[in-house]
Image (cartoon, rainbow, N blue to C red):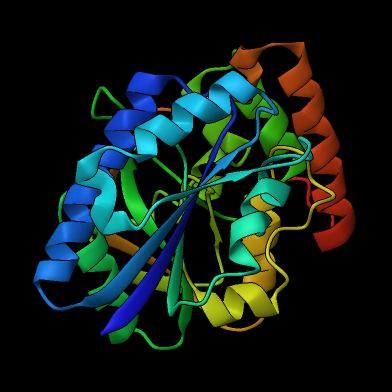
Amino acid sequence: MDTLSISIVSHFSPRDALQRTLESLTTAVSLALTAGQLASVKLALIDNSQSVSEATALQQLLEMPELAGLSPHLIQAPDNRGYGAANNLSILHAASDFHLILNPDVVLDEGAISAALAAMHAHPACVLLTPRAVDRSGAVQHVAKDKPGAITLLARALPLSPRLKDLLGNRQYELRDMLVNAPTTGRFLAGGCFMFCRTHALQRAGGFDEGYFMYFEDFDLSARLTRAGDVLYCPAVCIVHGGGGAAGKGFRHILWFSRSAGRFFRQHGWRWKS
């Protein structure tokens, strides 16, 4: 049987969304425990708020009896150095076979953990699994991506027609012709909302690059993990993801996105079009 560690970073996350995430995670983990796939689970909820009242509220949330099977504990980040640095407070000290990096706005299908474990055993050369994701309306979210191109990213941010965006590389960026209904392995990139990793590979890579405050830290981690093995897209692992869309979140997010994109291109090579 396997062991699983999980990290969720919260920075004043809406309480109802976080509670839905924890409830769905509890159901999915319970199914895997009952099936004999898991020996133990340890959940770290990382509070990145530096707020005493927020930490108290999160601790109270973790004390709900239904979460006991997750062995939850709260980690308070001493300062806000970004999403990746907060996750590393759990990742770098995990003692598990697999580690799940999970956003606080994700709802898991009840079979998601069981399917992820089975898929990783069926594909031993894979170090990272990415799921089939939909938004709250049921529309597909393409969380697995090809390496981005600068023009492609710009096109995605502008009010262009879908056809023109596709001509500028968006279709290839979203791997729409490759990742459909069958498990697929390759050296593509995985979004950070749900990254199911082999812990030894994750730790050997050093976890997240803490030079990224927000955005592209997941792509950078994916790119570094693929030096050790493949990424597995597994449509049997299903989630609902409520996030995304930096351009609609205001100037600060656009600035963080731009800075992180520049760092990613400098580290992994420039590309104009996906």
User: Percent position (x, y) of residue 147?
Assistant: 65, 55
Which residue is rendered at x = 81% and y = 31% of the image?
A: 258
Res 251 → quadrant: top right
User: Percent position (x, y) of residue 237?
Assistant: 26, 57
Q: Is residue 162 left or right of residue 140?
A: right
Residue at the bottom extreme of this rendering: 124
Count of all numbered marks drawn on residues in the image: 0
User: Percent position (x, y) of residue 262?
Assistant: 86, 42
User: Percent position (x, y) of residue 6?
Assistant: 44, 58
Instruction: Examine the rendered structure and indicate whether residue 244 appears above or below residue 262.
Output: above
Which residue is rendered at x = 66% and y = 56% of the image?
A: 89
Res 135 → quadrant: top left
Instruction: Judge by depth and name the residue closer to the eye, 233 or 25.
Output: 25
Which residue is rendered at x = 49% and y = 42% of the image?
A: 171
Instruction: Examine the rendered structure and indicate whether residue 32 appears above or below residue 218.
Output: below
Residue at the left extreme of this rendering: 34
Q: Is residue 69 visible?
A: yes
Q: Quarter of the image containing the N terminus?
A: bottom left
Instruction: Examine the rendered structure and indicate whether residue 147 appears above or below residue 40.
Output: above
Q: Is residue 135 left or right of residue 112?
A: right
Which residue is rendered at x = 38% and y = 70% of the image?
A: 4
Instruction: Examine the rendered structure and indicate whether residue 7 appears above or below residue 15.
Output: below
Instruction: Judge by depth and name the residue closer to the eye, 254 or 33.
Output: 33
Q: Is residue 241 visible?
A: no
